[in-house]
Amino acid sequence: MTDKIKRNKKNKAWMMEHVTDTYVQRAKAEGWRSRAAFKLTEIDDQDRLLKPGMTVVDLGSAPGSWSQVASRRILPEGRLIALDILPMDSLHGVEFIQGDFREETVLHQLEGMLEGRQVDLVLSDMAPNMSGIELTDQARVMYLAELTLEFCERKMKPGGDMLVKVFQGSGFMELRSAVLQMFQTVQVRKPAASRGRSAENFLLARGKRA
């Protein structure tokens, strides 16, 4: 079987799974931009991260489902800045930056929009374009998580929280240790809406140390 045929069969299988996915169907019915909305909803319902009036940064925001959830729970008193390398349709009350979080100019733009305000909560559902090479993809995911942690170190207020996507694998324990040095507690969350076969997990870090 050629590689092209294998890819086509894999794509068809993914499309069938996607179309019949319960969370995909619910997202369409309830007006969410993607099934990922249910991941943040479940975590927030359990852990009470989002509160009215907070300043929140949503990294890797496109197509906008996490921003939808967060904005409904922090506005109108709160402030939400979303960022993604991909375009994102506008959302009421959400300020959006299109750019690559790995680039200094984009990071400076984000920091400038904060206007000196410290962040209460950083959400990151960022993921790189996957190459299919496990070690490469794992390294890229961990790099994004490390950049998120660095941003929290500079711009998050003491007592703030971080929720960041990670993959179990090489570098995970080292990242977890680094997070624990900055935050009082670290827990792993795997919401029901995360596909079972996925290595995706979320590190929930609470109580940034002063």
Image (cartoon, grey):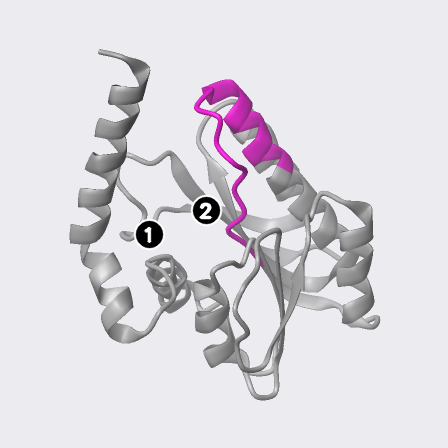
Name the kind of residue labelled 2 in the image: Phe
In the picture of the structure, the residue carrying the numbered disc 1 is 191
User: How far is the residue under mark 1 from the one under mark 2?
Assistant: 9 Å
The local crowd at label 1, few if under 14, some if 14 to 19, many if 20 or more residues have their Cα within 10 Å, is some
Decide: marks 1, 2 in contact (CB < 8 A)?
Answer: yes
- Which residue is nearer to you in this view: 43 or 29? 29
Q: Residue furthest top?
A: 1
* 136 in the magenta segment: yes
Residues shaded magenta: 123-143
Q: Quadrant of residue 147?
A: top right
Q: Is residue 115 left or right of residue 126?
A: right
* 153 in the magenta segment: no
Q: Image point 25% across, 39% down: which residue?
A: 14
Asked if residue 10 is positioned above or below residue 160 in the image, the reply reads: above
**Element at badge 1?**
loop
**Element at badge 2?**
strand
Instruction: Tell me the quadrant of the picture where the N terminus can be found.
Output: top left
Residue 106's spot in the image, x, y percent? 76, 53
Q: Is residue 37 left or right of residue 85?
A: left
Asked if residue 162 is positioned above or below residue 135 in the image, the reply reads: below
Q: Image point 24% across, 58% down: which residue?
A: 23
Instruction: Tell me the quadrant of the picture where the C terminus can be found.
Output: bottom right
Residue 110's spot in the image, x, y percent? 75, 61
- Which residue is nearer to you in this view: 81 or 206? 81
Q: Image point 77% across, 70% down: which residue?
A: 114
In the picture of the structure, the residue carrying the numbered disc 2 is 202
Q: Image point 33% across, 62% down: which residue?
A: 38
- Which residue is nearer to you in this view: 184 or 62? 62
The local crowd at label 2, few if under 14, some if 14 to 19, many if 20 or more residues have their Cα within 10 Å, is many
Q: Is residue 204 left or right of residue 53?
A: left
Residue 164's spot in the image, x, y percent? 53, 49
